[in-house]
Image: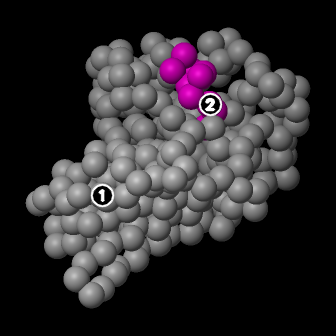
């Protein structure tokens, strides 16, 4: 039985993680942590409830956990991971907005035999979209990314968009010009430039998580789009990561690393 602690458990993603883990016959949520919702009773999806705890260090000391699943906020995720890793707990991280420098610092703190797994997106379809975009970029280097999320998302561009841009930049054979910045009527109209790839971020109520990678070529365009219309779309990837981190160590970034690549 894999014993799991969920941080950010009272949030929309955290609640889904609690239910998804509980539904697995070889897993159990032993504790839910969320300082903003201490004492809240969370439905585990199996007819029982969990009382939300407030202090992660005390919770880890009180419960024998194997894996921490974190869907919190960029301002608190680092400390959560340090506490968990120091206790020898493997970590599965869905919180985005972690800077490269912060991630490198965390990687240096991973104890021997412990795994720190970070994914910008846990939806299998999103990982496939990134994989197909990477392949397309070898032949169609002119590309822009449009990502759309709910209006309460803490970071922009999204972690998925940043990861997609990074993978494309590693693959495409040339960096074509991205014209239009010099003639912007409104600053930022052409989007953000990341790894020489333009990213446009949309934030609106009613959205969940969506991304389109748009390629242009001579007389043609190619559009690759993924839509998560419900947060349950991320759960198969979370469950895969919870199982896999028990057999791995060190820093691993990207769900594709657990999918046979």
Mark number, residue 178 = 1
Distance, label 1 to label 2, CA atoms, is: 33 Å
* Colour convention: one colour
Look at the image and tell me in which quarter the C terminus lies.
Answer: bottom left
Point 20% across, 60% down: residue = 176
User: Do labels 1 and 2 touch, CB within 8 Å?
Assistant: no
Left or right, 154 with reference to 81: right
Left or right, 215 with reference to 86: left
| Secondary structure category for the residue under label 2 | loop
Specify whether residue 34 is in view: yes
Residue placed most toward the observer, 259 or 164: 164
* Mark 2, residue position: 73
User: Residue 198: x percent and y percent?
Assistant: 38, 54
Left or right, 158 with reference to 233: left
User: Residue 78: x percent and y percent?
Assistant: 51, 21
Q: How packed is label 1: few (under 14 Cα within 10 Å), some, or many (20 or more)?
A: some
Specify whether residue 127 is in view: no
Q: Which residues are magenta?
A: 71-80
């Amino acid at each position: 039985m894999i014993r799991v602690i969920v941080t950010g458990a009272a949030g929309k993603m955290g609640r889904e993680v609690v239910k998804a883990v509980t539904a697995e016959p070889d897993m159990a949520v032993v504790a839910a942590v969320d300082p903003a919702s201490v004492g809240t009773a969370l439905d585990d999806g199996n007819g029982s409830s969990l009382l939300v705890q407030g202090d992660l260090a005390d919770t880890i000391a009180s419960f024998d956990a194997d894996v921490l699943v974190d869907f919190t906020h960029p301002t608190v995720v680092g400390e959560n991971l340090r506490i968990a890793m120091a206790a020898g707990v493997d970590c599965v991280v869905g919180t985005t907005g972690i800077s490269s420098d912060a991630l490198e610092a965390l990687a240096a703190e991973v104890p021997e035999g412990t795994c720190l797994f970070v994914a910008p997106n846990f939806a299998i379809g999103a990982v496939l979209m990134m994989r197909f975009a990477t392949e397309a970029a070898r032949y169609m280097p002119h590309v822009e990314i449009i990502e759309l999320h709910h209006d309460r998302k803490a970071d922009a561009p999204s972690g998925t968009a940043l990861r997609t841009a990074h993978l494309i930049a590693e693959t495409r054979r040339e960096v074509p010009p991205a014209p239009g910045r010099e003639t912007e009527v409104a600053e930022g109209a052409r989007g953000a430039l990341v790894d020489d790839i333009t990213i446009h971020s949309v934030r609106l109520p009613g959205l969940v998580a969506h991304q389109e990678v748009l390629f242009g070529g001579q007389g043609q365009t190619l559009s690759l789009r993924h839509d998560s219309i419900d947060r349950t779309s991320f759960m198969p990837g979370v469950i895969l990561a919870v199982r896999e981190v028990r057999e791995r160590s060190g820093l691993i970034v990207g769900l594709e690393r657990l999918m046979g690549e």
